[in-house]
Amino acid sequence: MKTWRAALALMLFALAGCGTVPVEQYRDERPVLDLRRYFDGTIDGWGLFQDRSGKVVKRFYVRIDAKWVGDTGTLDEHFEYSDGTRSRRVWTITRLDEHRYRGTAADVVGEARGEAYGNALRWQYVLNLEVDGKTYAVDFDDWMYLMDDRVMLNRSVMSKFGVRLGELMLSFSKRK
């Protein structure tokens, strides 16, 4: 029994050490992502959620109506899911300095933290996610990459207690 516990502890320690690349590594990538410029106006997005086995569980479309006043932005997200359901999330995002952002929304636990360098943004938060009538606090690790002035790609890993639950993939297109 002790061997099993030691092996489990070692595995959990190893998983905890599996980090991700620092967002600063993208500092020289172009075009430079300025959240205030990109998330201003209407942005359309198409995405899907895959469970940890890779099965596509849900597809969706999101329209984001975004505007900024100074260093504070509002992103009003309207979701339409493949099963016919709809939802809405309104983010309030504050630019803290050249690279750091924080955000809040009704279903976000505490504050989201974001850091942008070059064309990349890493956005981390805990979301109260409703599944089958129950609410779970799920960790989100979002990476967004600006491809050009209109297109951004987003990959989110969802986890709970460090265990990967699945991934979200999105493609955003800013309207002209």
Image (cartoon, grey):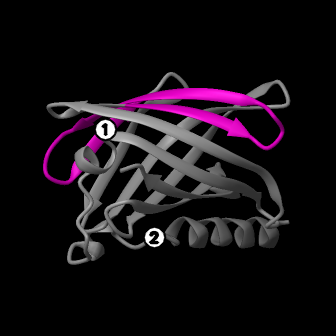
* Residue at the outermost front position: 176
Is residue 49 positioned above or below 119 on the image?
above
Q: Quadrant of residue 116?
A: bottom left
Magenta-span inclusion, residue 175: no
Question: Which residue is depicted at the point 53% across and 28% down?
Answer: 89
Circle 1 packing at 10 Å, graded few (<14), some (14-19), many (20+), is some
Q: Which residue is mark 1?
A: 102
Residue 20 image label: 2
Q: Position of residue 126 (x, y in %)?
A: 53, 39
Report the amino acid beneath label 2: Thr
Question: Which residue is depicted at the point 58% across and 27% down?
Answer: 88
Q: CA distance from mark 2 to mark 1?
A: 20 Å
Report the amino acid beneath label 1: Arg
Earlier sequence position, callout 2 versus callout 1: 2
Q: Which residues are magenta?
A: 75-104
Magenta-span inclusion, residue 101: yes
Count of numbered marks: 2
In the picture, measured across the screen, residue 121 lies left or right of residue 137, that is left
In the picture, measured across the screen, residue 169 lies left or right of residue 2, that is left
173 or 103, which is in the foreground? 173
